[in-house]
Structures are given as C-alpha cells and as structure tokens.
Image (tube, rainbow, N blue to C red):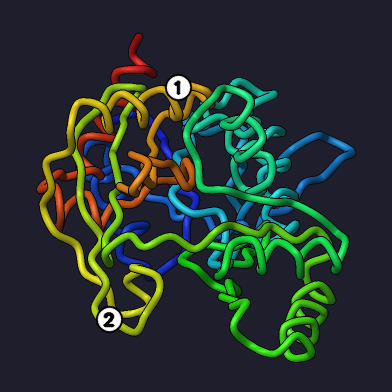
Amino acid sequence: MSKLQIGVVGIPGKWSTETLADEVAARTGFRLVIDMAKVTHDLSNNRLTFEGHDLCELDAIIVKKISSQYSPNTLDRLELLRVAESHGVRVFSGAETMLRLVDRLSCTVTMRNAGIPMPDTIMTEDINTAVKAVHNYGEAVFKPLFSTKARGMCVFSAKQSEKKLRKEIEDFHAENPMMYIQKKLDLSGQDLGLVFLGGEYLGTYARISGDSETWNTTINSGGRYAAYTPSDEIIEIADKAQSLFGLDFTTVDVAESEQGPIVFEVSAFGGFRGAQEGAGLDAAKLYVNYVLDKIAG
C-alpha cells in the first residue's frame, strides 16, 4: 500500500481531520490534508489543484469535512470533487451522494418518501403558515436548510405574544426563505448516533444534554457522549434510512419519542469523536481499512 496517494478533505487542525490523515499516512506513507477553500478548478485542462498537488492524480480522496459550516457554498465544493471523480479518483463518499445530504430539505424529502418515521415537520416560505404551525405544535424548532451542530436553529413557542412570535419568524425568514419547521419533542435530553460503514452497522453512541435548560444535545451546547445499546427496532430504522443514500461512512441521528423511534437526519460525513468516545470505535482506522480494501478490490 506504500505507493497509494490518498488525500483527506477536511478542516486543517481539527481533530477528526488530522486523525484521519494520520491514519492514512501510517498505512500509505502519504499525508495530504486538503482545504477546499484553496482548491482550484482550471476548466482549460479540466484539472483540480491544491497547493501544487494535482488532485486528479490521487488514488482516492476521503471527505471528512467539506466546510466548517454548511451553506450553499458547501454544494459548490462538492461539485468540484466531481472533477477528480471524472479522472478516475475514488471519492469516499461519492460527491453526488454527499450532495443529496448537505441540504436538509433534500435529505428529509428522500427519507419521508421512503416512509422513515420523522418528527412532524412543515416546509414553507409563507409566514402565516409558519405562525400557524407554531400554534399547532405548541413549540417548534426552526432549522436552516444548511447547518450543522444546531447552528442557526431557533425554538419558538405559541405561549409568547402573537406580535413577538410573528416578528421572530419574520427575522428567521429574512435569513431562511424556505423555513424548515419541526415540532419540538420531549426527548429527555438524549438522542442517538448510529454508525455505519459501507452500509454495515458498527455501533451506537448517545448524546446527552449537559444542561436541563438547553433544548439540544450537541457538544457545542455542552452535551457529552455516552455508550448506548439500541433496540433492534432502532437499528432497523436507522439502517433503512442510511441505505437510501449509499454513503461509505455515516451516522444516523435517531431519538426515542412517545410514538417510537424517529430519525432526524443522515449525516453526509459522520461523527468520529462520538463513535470513539461513546461507542468505543476507532472510526479513522476502520474507515481507512475500508477505503484500502475498496481500492484493492
């Protein structure tokens, strides 16, 4: 394997990116962390370059993180990776596969069309409909279509004054014309991440809220990871959800609600730290082994 050149797309300096790049280097002797903000596509010769490296000459590219925060620009970066793919470079997961998941709406529509159980959700550009949704739900989480780790999400309550509610929704709408509105559920301060590699289930970790006043469980909001053994039903639902997208590595966000397990999303990139700290999985090593096997095959 010493002759293989595998690049890692990620955020330089971030733990998961560097850990994955270290594992690739340990197995191949080659180390390259690719910052997509510095990648150039030259249409005249149809090449993709990064700091003197021709990415179209790599054997493979593993995408750990495409950007620190999701936005429409994230889609542009994934489109660039299709140039490398056109030259025969294996991208893990495939660029078009990841494109379907970065936009929350695209992920939701695919899962709902397949009958995956999800929270009550409304997508609308109409402010009056959004106000009505909050009243129907009692409390609602408004989510940007492009976000990660709950960034930009807002909780609105029907208990506040009509004037204040409408103003808050108008402010959210100004930044997010298509409003993604989800009924806020009582999840007892915990949700789950189910880890899959090549479509195979590896394990589960829990995200536990660090503050009873915080509505989400993300690590950014003080949450922590813990071990968890899910029911067969939860594994089956998560497996069906991830199978719709064909990712090489992913985590499926699941919660246990009064009506049974529900799926929030399938991650385009998956979480390494949760897999390690909560499920005891060395995701970087497992992923690199998987990639090497696929290239060799």
Q: Which sits in the foreground, 295 or 14?
A: 14
Instruction: Give the farthest residue toward the top.
Output: 297
Residue 99 bears which disc, if any? none
Residue 243 bears which disc, if any? 1
Q: Which sits in the foreground, 277 or 177?
A: 177
Q: Residues within 10 Å of mark 1 (few under 14, many from 20)?
A: some
Specify whether 124 is left or right of 265. right
Residue 17 coordinates in the image, percent (x, y):
37, 57
Residue 55 coordinates in the image, percent (x, y):
59, 40
Looking at the rendering, in which quadrant would you find the C terminus? Answer: top left
Residue 147 coordinates in the image, percent (x, y):
59, 63
Residue visible at 56% across and 26% down? Answer: 89
Looking at the rendering, in which quadrant would you find the N terminus? Answer: top left
Specify whether 88 is left or right of 48. left
Q: Residues within 10 Å of mark 2 (few under 14, many from 20)?
A: few
- Residue 38 in view of the camera: no
